[in-house]
Image (spheres, rainbow, N blue to C red):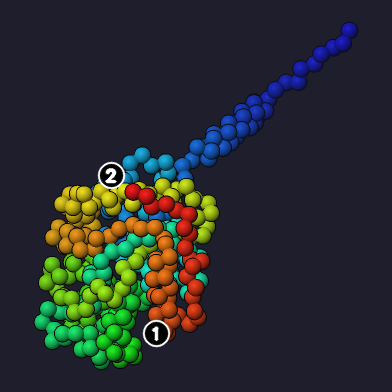
Amino acid sequence: MTASFSRPVSRRGVLRAGGAAAVIAFGAISVKARAQARPVLKAGDQKGGLRALLEAAGGLEGLGYDIQWSEFPAAAPLAEALNAAAVDSGPIGDAPLIFALAAGTRVKAIGANRSNSYGTAVLVRPDSPLKTAADLKGKSIATNRGSIGHYVTLKAITAAGLKPEEVNIRFLAPADAKLALTQGSVDAWATWEPYTALAEVSRHARVLVSGRGLLPGLSYLAATDAAIAAKRPVLQDFLQRVVKAQLWSYRNVNAYSAALARIIGIPPEAAKLQFERRQQRWIPIDAQVIADQQGTADFYRQVGLIRQPLDVKGTFDTGFGVAG
């Protein structure tokens, strides 16, 4: 006959066993939670940009992912955030994108749009004696380095027969540049929408030279190479929502203008003015887009803002659709 002995179980053993079970259970929950976690798109934006458009159009409903928004006052800090992988994507103009790529930022344009470039302009005070771009010789112009404002400044003065060194460009953020203009510490301010419309409506400035006829009017949704590799379906869905929201906005001009004014905190008349004259349209990335972008890169090389020639073909990802 074989004797059977049961070892006494201590209270400590029970607690240890229970703790182990709890750890196992917690681990299972944690794994399940990770499995069910929604993707996160770190979306950069500029004032009056994509978030306002999507919110006004109801374009953020039914998302299968979360969006972590970061707003920037201009393209340069947005480009820095893309370079640091602090954001996955963001809207950026053709000239700032060239500047970012030349600096080694690993991004690509995944969507393109064209707009009327009137609101990308060199502004002066309403009482300024300056009448043409040629009058900017020897004058001071505030803008962001590498911005579309910087680009329109250089385009305007070279078209007027001036050299870049014949004007004094002061690099300031939009809010500081506006203050410098209104206080008279600079002669002009080169900026973009909605800042141009806001300055006009508030009678703080008038347009001296507009970008119409000087610029191709291109802007992009850019994304980092890492985000394209890891979040391509999310980026495709986000881009498509932006395209649909843009189509909605032109069918609902008054409603969108009112919503835009409320969301970004500018007067309704400024919101409507900048929106209606931009006439922004998302377009396929075709040979003409690439050629126009190459022209921008070549111009930046010509005026010495980038040191090496840049072939832009590799900076586009044409695999994202923009069908309305």
Badge 1 element: loop
The disc at residue 303 is: 1
Apparent side of residue 199 relative to residue 292 in the rendered image (left or right): left
Q: Position of residue 95 (x, y in %)?
A: 37, 72
Apparent side of residue 215 relative to residue 3 in the rendered image (left or right): left
Specify the farthest residue to the right.
1
Quarter of the image with the N terminus in it: top right
Q: What kind of residue is marked 1?
A: Val
**Which residue in the structure is indicated by mark 2?**
58
Tell me the quarter of the picture where residue 161 sits.
bottom left
Of the two numbered discs 2 and 1 in the rendering, the one whose residue sits closer to the viewer: 1
Q: Position of residue 43 (x, y in %)?
A: 40, 55
The disc at residue 76 is: none
Answer above or below: position of 145 versus 86.
below
Badge 2 element: loop
Q: Residue at x 16, y 86 (%)?
A: 130
Tell me the quarter of the picture where residue 110 sits.
bottom left
Evaluate whether residue 41 shows in this view: no
Specify the farthest residue to the top.
1
Specify the farthest residue to the front.
287
Tell me the quarter of the picture where residue 141 sits.
bottom left
Q: Residue at x 28, y 52 (%)?
A: 246
Q: Residue at x 24, y 60 (%)?
A: 279
Q: Nearer the viewer, residue 2 or 227?
A: 227
Q: Residue at x 34, y 88 (%)?
A: 164
Label 1 Cα neighbours within 10 Å, binned few <14 / some 14-19 / many ≥20:
some
Q: What kind of residue is marked 2?
A: Gly
- Distance of label 2 from label 1 (alpha carbons): 43 Å
Q: Nearer the viewer, residue 301 or 126?
A: 301
| Mark 2 or 1, nearer chain start | 2
Q: Position of residue 181 (x, y in %)?
A: 20, 79
